[in-house]
Image (cartoon, rainbow, N blue to C red):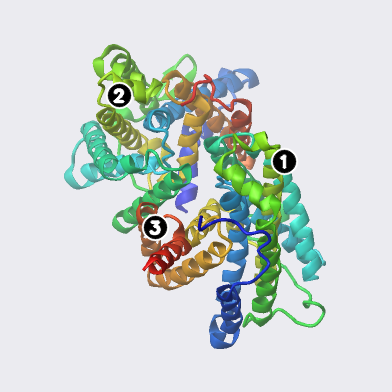
C-alpha cells in the first residue's frame, strides 16, 4: 500500500525542494563545473523524456536518441541559418521532434517488447545514417558548424564559462519537470502506469490504450527534442553522436540507474552517471566502459529499482524498526 | 580508420577491382549486359556467403530468443571471442587456420555454458528491460576487455594458400574462401537438421521450444536442455566469428557493430525454426552487399530501411512462428 498514488500530488516534499535548491547552489559552490552541470541538466531532461516513455508507459526503446538528435539538428540548423533566438529554437525543436515521434509511435505501439525494441533500434540507426549521409545539410561526420546563438532573452550571451548555459538548462529542466510532475499524477499519468502494469485489462475499463501510448511516445519525443536543442544551443555545435546508438544506451542506463518510473530517478541517475563518467573516463576511457558494463550486470542482479529504489527500501526498513 | 577498413571488408573486393575502366576494351566480355550480369552473379554470391555467416552466428541467438525468450544483446561477444581465439592460436602458437576452428567452437561453447549456468539462467523469467541491460553490460565488458588485451585495431588473418584466390567459372569469378564458407555452413546446417530432427537431444529441444512446461512434465530436464542449447549456440557464434574474420573483420567493437544484424536475422526469421533465420540471413546478406555495391553513397542507410520495412511487413517473422 506504500505506493498508493495520490491525486493530485500538488504538495512538494521537503526532499524535493532540497534537490532543486542543491542544483541551484551548484552554480555558486562549483563555478568550475558549470559546463558539466549544464550537461547533467540536459541529460536529466533527456532521461525524463525516456522516463515518460519507458518508466511510465512501459515502452522499451533503444532508439530514443533519434528524437534528441532531431531536436538538436533542428535548433542547430535554425541557428546556423540565421535564426539564433534560443527560446523559439527550443519550441521549433520540440515541434519537429514531436512530429517525428508521432509518426514513429504508430510503428512502435503496435508490437510487443521485442518488436518495439527492434523497430526503435532500426529507426534510430536509420536516422543516424541519414544524417551521416546528408552531409550537405548536417555536415556529416564533421558535425554541424557555424551555430551562432543570439543572446538569451536579448540579455544574456552564451559564455565559455557556462553561466548562461547553466541557468538556461536548469530553468528549462525545472519548467518541464514541474509539468511532467503534474502530468504523472494526472489521470493520464495513472492510466499510463496501469497500461504498463496490465495492458490487457485496460480496454476493459474503457481506456484507449493505443491513443494513450501514442500520446506518451509523442510527448517523450518532444521533450527529448528540447533536450537535444538545449545541447545544440549551449555548446553551439551538433555532432553525429547526438543521434548515435551509444546515446540511446547511455540514457537508458542513466534512467535505470536512478530508478525508472520515478521522476526523480531521471534526475539522480544522470547526475551520478555523468560525474562517474567525468572522473573515470579521465582515468582511462576503456576502464570506464568496463566499469559501466560491470555496473549494469551487477545492477540487474542486486539493485533493481535503481538508486531511488534502494533508498526506498532502506527507508522502509528503517521505518519498520 | 578501423571502421573504414571494416566497411571496405564488407564490400566485395573482387567486384570493385573489376570496374569498367580497368576492363580491357577488346575483351568480348566487356559489353554492357554480360558485365552487369556477371556483377549480379558476383553480388549474389558474395551476399550468400555473407548471409551464411550471419546465419551461423545468429542461430544461437534464435534459440535463446525462441527457446528461452531471452533478449541477448551480447551474442556478438561470443562471435568476437571465437574470432580472437582463432587469431591468438594462429599468431602466437602457429596453429593452422583450419585447426583453430573447432577450438574456437569448443572454447566459446564452454564459455557460453559457464555464463549460462552462472548468470543468464537467473534472468530467464526477468523482464525484457532487465535482460537488455544485463546483456548490454556484458557486451560492454567484453568490448572493454578486448580493447585492453588486443587494442582497438582491426585484427589481421592470414588464410592458408589453398583458401585464397579466385575460381573462374561460367564467366564469373568466385572467391575460394567464400565458396569454402558456403560449403562449411551448408554442411553444418545439414548436421543441425539431422541433430534436431533425428536425435533424442533434438526431440527434447523441439519439445522445450514448443512448450517448456509440458516438456518438463514429460520428464525432460529442460534446464539441461537450455544449457546445452545455449552452449551449442555460443559455440556456433564463436565458429562464425572465427570463420568471419576475413569477411566481417574483427575488432573490439564487433559485438555492437553487428548486433543489429544478428537480432534482425532472428526477429525477421522468426524464432524456433532453422529455415526462417536461414532465409532472413540470406535476404539480409544479399541486400547488404547489393546496397553497398550499387548505391555506396547511401551507405548502411539502405539496409536499415530494408530492416524497418521487413519488421513492419512481417511482425511475426517470415515464417510466422514466434515463441
- Assess disc 1: are there few (<14), some (14-19) or many (≥20) residues with their C-alpha within 10 Å of its C-alpha: few
What is the C-alpha distance between the residues marked 2 and 3? 31 Å
Determine the residue located farthest toward the top in the rendered image: B198
User: Which dot marks residue A211?
Assistant: 1
Residue tagged 3: A303
| Residue A76: percent from left, percent from top | 72, 63
Residue A246 seen = yes
Determine the residue located farthest toward the bottom in the rendered image: A28
Taking the spot 54% from the left edge, 84% from the top edge, the residue there is: A32
Q: Tell how many labels.
A: 3
| Residue B252: percent from left, percent from top | 38, 50
Q: Quadrant of residue A318?
A: bottom left
Q: Nearer the viewer, residue B123 or B7?
A: B123
Task: Judge whether B150 appears above or below B317 on screen.
Answer: below
Chain identifier of the residue bearing label 2 in the image = B
User: Which dot marks residue B60?
Assistant: none
Do callouts 1 and 3 point to residues on the same chain?
Answer: yes
Q: Nearer the viewer, residue A210 or B74?
A: A210
Q: Quadrant of residue A60?
A: top right
Disc nearer the start of the sequence (1/3): 1
Residue tagged 2: B216
Q: Quadrant of the C terminus of chain A?
A: bottom left
Is disc 2 placed on a helix, strand or loop?
Answer: helix
Left or right: residue B143 compared with residue B224 = right
| Residue B256: percent from left, percent from top | 45, 46
Taking the spot 65% from the left edge, 63% from the top edge, the residue there is: A9
Chain identifier of the residue bearing label 1 in the image = A
| Residue A194: percent from left, percent from top | 60, 45
Do callouts 2 and 1 point to residues on the same chain?
Answer: no
Residue B42 seen = no
Amino acid at each position: 500500500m506504500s505506493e498508493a498514488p495520490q491525486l493530485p500530488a500538488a504538495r512538494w516534499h521537503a526532499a524535493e525542494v532540497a534537490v532543486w535548491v542543491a542544483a541551484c547552489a551548484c552554480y555558486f559552490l562549483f563555478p568550475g563545473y558549470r559546463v558539466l552541470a549544464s550537461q547533467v541538466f540536459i541529460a536529466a531532461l533527456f532521461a525524463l523524456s525516456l522516463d515518460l516513455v519507458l518508466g511510465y508507459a512501459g515502452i522499451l526503446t533503444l532508439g530514443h536518441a533519434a528524437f534528441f538528435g532531431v531536436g538538436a539538428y533542428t535548433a542547430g540548423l535554425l541557428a546556423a541559418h540565421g535564426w539564433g533566438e534560443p527560446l523559439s529554437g527550443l519550441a521549433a525543436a520540440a515541434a519537429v521532434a514531436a512530429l517525428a515521434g508521432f509518426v514513429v509511435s504508430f510503428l512502435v505501439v503496435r508490437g510487443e517488447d521485442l518488436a518495439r525494441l527492434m523497430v526503435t533500434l532500426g529507426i534510430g540507426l536509420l536516422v543516424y545514417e541519414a544524417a551521416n549521409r546528408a552531409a550537405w545539410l548536417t555536415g556529416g561526420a564533421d558535425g554541424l558548424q557555424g551555430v551562432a546563438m543570439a543572446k538569451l532573452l536579448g540579455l544574456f550571451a552564451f559564455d565559455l564559462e557556462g553561466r548562461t548555459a547553466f541557468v538556461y538548462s536548469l530553468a528549462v529542466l525545472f519548467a518541464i519537470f514541474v509539468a511532467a510532475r503534474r502530468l504523472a499524477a494526472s489521470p493520464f499519468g495513472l492510466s499510463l502506469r496501469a497500461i504498463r502494469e496490465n495492458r490487457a485489462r485496460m480496454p476493459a475499463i474503457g481506456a484507449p490504450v493505443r491513443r494513450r501510448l501514442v500520446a506518451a511516445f509523442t510527448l517523450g519525443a518532444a521533450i527529448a527534442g528540447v533536450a537535444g536543442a538545449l545541447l545544440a544551443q549551449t555548446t553551439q555545435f551538433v555532432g553525429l553522436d547526438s543521434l548515435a546508438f551509444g546515446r540511446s544506451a547511455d540514457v537508458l542506463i542513466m534512467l535505470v540507474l536512478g530508478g525508472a518510473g520515478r521522476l526523480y530517478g531521471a534526475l539522480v541517475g544522470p547526475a551520478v552517471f555523468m560525474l562517474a563518467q567525468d572522473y573515470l573516463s579521465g582515468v582511462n576511457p576503456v576502464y570506464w566502459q568496463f566499469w559501466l558494463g560491470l555496473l549494469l550486470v551487477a545492477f540487474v542482479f542486486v539493485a533493481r529499482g535503481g538508486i531511488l529504489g534502494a533508498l526506498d527500501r532502506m527507508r522502509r526498513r528503517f521505518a519498520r524498526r | 580508420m578501423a571502421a573504414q577498413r571494416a566497411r571496405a571488408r564488407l564490400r566485395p573486393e573482387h567486384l570493385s577491382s573489376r570496374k569498367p575502366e580497368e576492363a580491357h576494351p577488346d575483351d568480348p566480355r566487356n559489353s554492357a549486359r554480360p558485365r552487369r550480369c556477371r556483377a549480379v552473379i558476383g553480388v549474389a554470391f558474395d551476399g550468400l556467403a555473407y548471409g551464411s555467416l550471419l546465419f551461423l552466428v545468429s542461430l544461437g541467438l534464435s534459440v535463446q530468443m525462441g527457446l528461452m525468450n531471452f533478449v541477448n544483446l551480447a551474442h556478438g561477444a561470443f562471435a568476437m571471442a571465437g574470432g580472437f581465439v582463432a587469431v591468438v592460436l594462429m599468431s602466437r602458437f602457429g596453429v593452422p587456420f583450419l585447426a583453430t576452428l573447432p577450438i574456437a567452437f569448443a572454447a566459446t561453447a564452454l564459455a557460453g555454458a559457464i555464463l549460462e549456468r552462472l548468470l543468464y539462467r537467473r534472468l530467464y523469467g526477468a523482464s525484457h528491460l532487465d535482460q537488455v541491460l544485463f546483456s548490454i553490460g556484458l557486451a560492454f565488458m567484453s568490448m572493454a576487455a578486448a580493447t585492453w588485451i588486443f587494442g582497438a585495431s582491426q585484427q589481421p588473418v592470414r588464410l592458408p594458400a589453398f583458401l585464397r584466390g579466385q575460381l573462374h567459372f561460367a564467366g564469373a569469378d568466385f572467391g575460394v574462401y567464400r565458396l569454402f564458407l558456403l560449403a562449411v555452413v551448408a554442411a553444418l546446417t545439414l548436421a543441425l537438421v539431422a541433430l534436431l530432427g533425428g536425435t533424442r537431444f533434438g526431440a527434447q529441444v523441439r519439445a522445450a521450444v514448443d512448450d517448456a512446461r509440458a516438456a518438463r512434465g514429460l520428464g525432460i530436464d529442460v534446464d539441461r536442455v537450455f544449457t546445452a542449447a545455449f552452449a551449442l549456440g555460443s559455440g556456433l557464434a564463436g565458429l562464425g566469428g572465427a570463420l568471419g574474420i576475413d569477411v566481417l573483420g574483427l575488432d573490439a567493437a564487433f559485438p555492437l557493430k553487428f548486433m543489429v544484424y544478428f537480432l534482425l536475422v532472428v526477429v525477421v526469421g522468426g524464432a524456433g525454426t532453422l529455415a526462417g533465420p536461414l532465409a532472413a540471413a540470406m535476404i539480409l546478406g544479399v541486400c547488404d552487399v547489393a546496397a553497398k555495391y550499387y548505391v555506396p553513397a547511401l551507405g548502411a542507410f539502405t539496409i536499415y530501411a530494408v530492416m524497418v520495412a521487413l519488421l513492419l511487413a512481417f511482425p511475426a517473422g517470415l515464417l510466422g512462428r514466434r515463441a
